[in-house]
Image: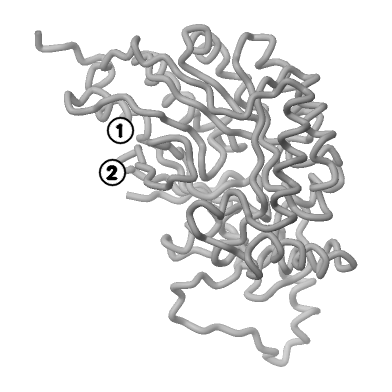
Amino acid sequence: MKTPHSSDAAPAPDAPLLPGAPLKGRGTAWAIAHRFETREREQFDDGWGNLDQQAAEETLPPRTQIIEEQAGRILSGNESPDIGFDLSINPYRGCEHGCIYCFARPTHSYLNLSPGLDFETRIIAKVNAAQRLRETLASPSYLPLALCLGTATDAYQPVERRLRITRGIVEVLAEAQHPFSLVTKSSGVERDLDLLAPMAARGQFAVYVSITTLDPQLARLLEPRAASPQRRLQTLRTLSEAGVPVGVSVSPVIPFLNEPELERILEAAADAGASSAFSIPLRLPWEVRPLFLDWLRQHYPERAERVMARLRDMRGGRDNDPRFGSRMRGEGLWADLLRQRMRKACQRLGLLRERRSMDYSGFRRPVGMAGQGDLF
């Protein structure tokens, strides 16, 4: 069951059907049709003025809608050899951070929503996530496996301050002493240090903070509603000082945009307390490709062709390469050079590149429902 309501207590206005001027605080203004769309729509002048004039007079900034969902299950299995975990939890579908490059944007297509503007303005909140997780971990057939929280969309995006769905999940994991890792670009993770720090002390938790750039202007364009680069560095330092093993994700690496900063980001992260690092070249699956191209031509028209040409050099001549073994690494000369730069910088800074091992020996099944005791 899904129940829509708006974080601003009002419904979102109709979004533009075609690429338009940038919207402040949004990654894209384009409600691009998803790949399963069967209807064709187009704008037309109805005699009451031209389309540009109507858009200027009638279009309001899109508000964020939260659609509550009762999830049937909360754990997703992973069969990709490129990814170092077995299970994942995503408390939300869609993400208000609005990162234009987000590889998860196409998942909104399965909801009959646009991977463009809808992805960052219509957020699906799995309000029963903690309950479903508790039931799953309590099952006698469940065996603890490598688990990652927030793999597709950020578990600490802005709406988490109010809904606290991620907090509920972390409470269940802490009760069960189930090890897990986390990737986030939000300072919101600091709120849950009362649970995360003790788990880290037992070897049951590690976190990666995503830092794509140190340039505030580029960050505002790439990730309009995420924490600033300096705030993320502060979060990294806060976590490290609390005893949490923390790494940095310099992802995605975009040629000629944030790629020149690779070493400086790693240096800043190491100085803030990071002990490990990884990076992934830009991926452009499905609808992300036209959205990113539109964004690139709007904000960096003089670099657009160079960026895409270099990306194709790393993707076998294509804009995107979905093959296992290549999609997370790239191939060819430029991809090799990026890996060499990453390896040398990590060696110089003492940053680990392997995933941290977790201690599963303390796992204990929680009771099936909150407050419900065992029969025996």
> For the view shown, which residue lies furthest in the right direction?
302
* Residue 341 in the image, given as x and y percentages of width and height: 77, 40
- Compared with 292, 146 (above or below) is above
Measuring 63% from the left and 54% from the top, which residue is drawn there?
330
Q: Do labels 1 and 2 touch, CB within 8 Å?
A: yes
The circle drawn on residue 72 is: 2
Left or right: 120, with 180 as reference point: right
Residue named by callout 1? 132
> For the view shown, which residue lies furthest in the bottom direction?
47
Which sits earlier in the primary sequence, circle 1 or circle 2?
Answer: 2
Measuring 42% from the left and 30% from the top, which residue is drawn there?
147
Element type at marker 1? Answer: helix
Element type at marker 2? Answer: loop
The circle drawn on residue 352 is: none
Quick one: 67 or 34, which is closer to the camera?
Answer: 34
* Residue 45 in the image, given as x and y percentages of width and height: 70, 89
Q: CA distance from mark 1 to mark 2?
A: 8 Å
Measuring 22% from the left and 22% from the top, which residue is drawn there?
368
Quick one: 190 or 337, which is closer to the camera?
Answer: 337
